[in-house]
Image (cartoon, rainbow, N blue to C red):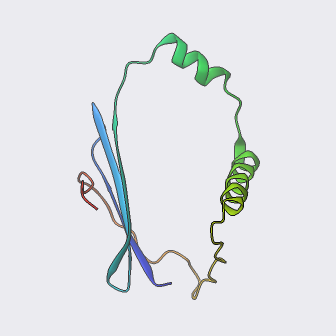
Amino acid sequence: MDQTYRLRYSAPGERLAVGFTVMEGGRRRLTASMALRRHRPTRRALGRVATRPRRGPTGTSAGIYTNALRLWGKGATIHPNPRPSGPSCHSGHSGHSEPPDSGG
């Protein structure tokens, strides 16, 4: 897996746009982006955040595997993780301040 990725983000303000693209063999393999809008926090929202239980690393891993089991139960194909070919799985990164592409 000789992949590179490109991270794009806007300067935070009233809106924030984040996106990344994964390239492999000169072809775009994956593009993902999201656009967020700032909202004034309400007491109710702050209360939910303050009282929400923290998952931590173990809880996060459990959630990932639980979702994987649900997908497997629905008939999703399971692919094994490829072994890294070199000392690092990451082959590239560039971050700069530009909004993500809006198209696919």
Q: Is residue 97 left or right of residue 73?
A: left
| Residue 26 on image: x %, y % | 32, 84
Task: Indicate the quadrant containing the C terminus: top left, top right, bottom left or bottom right.
Answer: bottom left
- Is any part of residue 13 visible from this angle? no
Q: Is residue 1 above or below residue 74?
A: below
Q: Nearer the viewer, residue 71 or 57?
A: 71
Q: Nearer the viewer, residue 32 or 5?
A: 32
Residue farthest to the front, as pictured: 75
- The mark tally for this picture is 0
- Is any part of residue 57 visible from this angle? yes
Q: Is residue 45 above or below residue 65?
A: above
| Residue 91 on image: x %, y % | 45, 78
Residue at image location 75% in from the left, 51% down from the top: 62
Quadrant in the picture for residue 64: bottom right
Quadrant in the picture for residue 88: bottom right
Q: Nearer the viewer, residue 98 or 19?
A: 19
| Residue 36 on image: x %, y % | 35, 38
Residue at image location 71% in from the left, 43% down from the top: 56
